Amino acid sequence: MEKQKKGILISVEGIDGSGKSTLAKNLKDKLENDKLPVVLTYEPGDTDLGTHIRKILQERDFDMCGKSEFLLFASDRAQHFKDVIIPNLQKNNIVISDRMADSSLVYQGYGRYEDKQMIKAVNKWVMTNIVPDLTIYIKISVDLAMERLQKRKTIPTAFEKEKKEFTKRLEKGYKEIFKDRKNVIILDGTKTEGELTDTAYVQVKKWLNL
């Protein structure tokens, strides 16, 4: 395999229950089989600071305003870029991140009704003007996503406990922010794990010209 010539940043997005974490891992494994330099990461939590922020955000049993929620995600993101994203891009690795800035725009902008332009501005600042080269969005209905979440044996996060109306706002948000974006691969979340992985792999390889 020809040596990777530049760092590539790929984000994977979707509402909770869409299967994005599984897809991100499977895609990483498939690309690694091609001897490509791939790093799998996630938000929030993949730094020392992020570990504590993730615990607060996902395990909290108290109310938190949308601004505070977003700023915690932004703090995690700033550290994530400094410690993980930028160093790996500089090494010409392919970085696959389970969630990134679009999640904040959707969850706090559309879900919590916070100022979308402010969220975009802060995201741009903490990401030092770096944006994903490619985004993979798993599109799935709210009903199916919530059905999947109910079947999970893990303790639900604060976001997984949200009401259906909140998740519907997220679904609408993703639809709106991706409708005119050219660097987004939209996948059908009703497909099997294997089908999703194969489709993502083929499309990413085509996008990478490999």
Image (cartoon, rainbow, N blue to C red):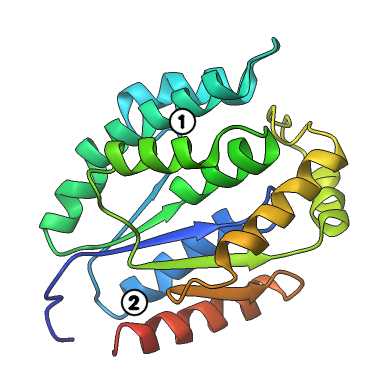
Q: Circle 1 sits in a helix, a strand or a loop, which is it?
A: helix
Which residue is at a point 34% across and 22% down the rendered structure image? 49
Q: Which residue is mark 2?
A: 33
* Image quadrant where one finds the N terminus: bottom left
* Mark 2: few/some/many CA within 10 Å (<14, 14-19, 20+): few
Residue 126 appears in the rendering: yes
| Residue 183 position within the rendered picture, expressed as x and y whole percent measured from the top left | 42, 74
Q: Earlier in the sequence, mark 1 or mark 2?
A: 2
Which residue is at a point 79% across and 33% down the rendered structure image? 162
Q: CA distance from mark 1 to mark 2?
A: 32 Å
The correct choice, above or below, for 80 with respect to 38 in the image is above
Q: Circle 2 sits in a helix, a strand or a loop, which is it?
A: helix
| Residue 9 position within the rendered picture, expressed as x and y whole percent measured from the top left | 31, 61
Left or right of 37? Residue 186 is: right
Left or right of 155? Residue 187 is: left
What's the mark number on residue 73?
A: 1
Name the residue type under label 2. Answer: Asn
Residue 99 appears in the rendering: no
Which residue is at a point 46% across and 80% down the rendered structure image? 201
Task: Name the mark nearer the viewer: 1 or 2.
Answer: 1
Nearest the viewer among 94 and 72 is 72
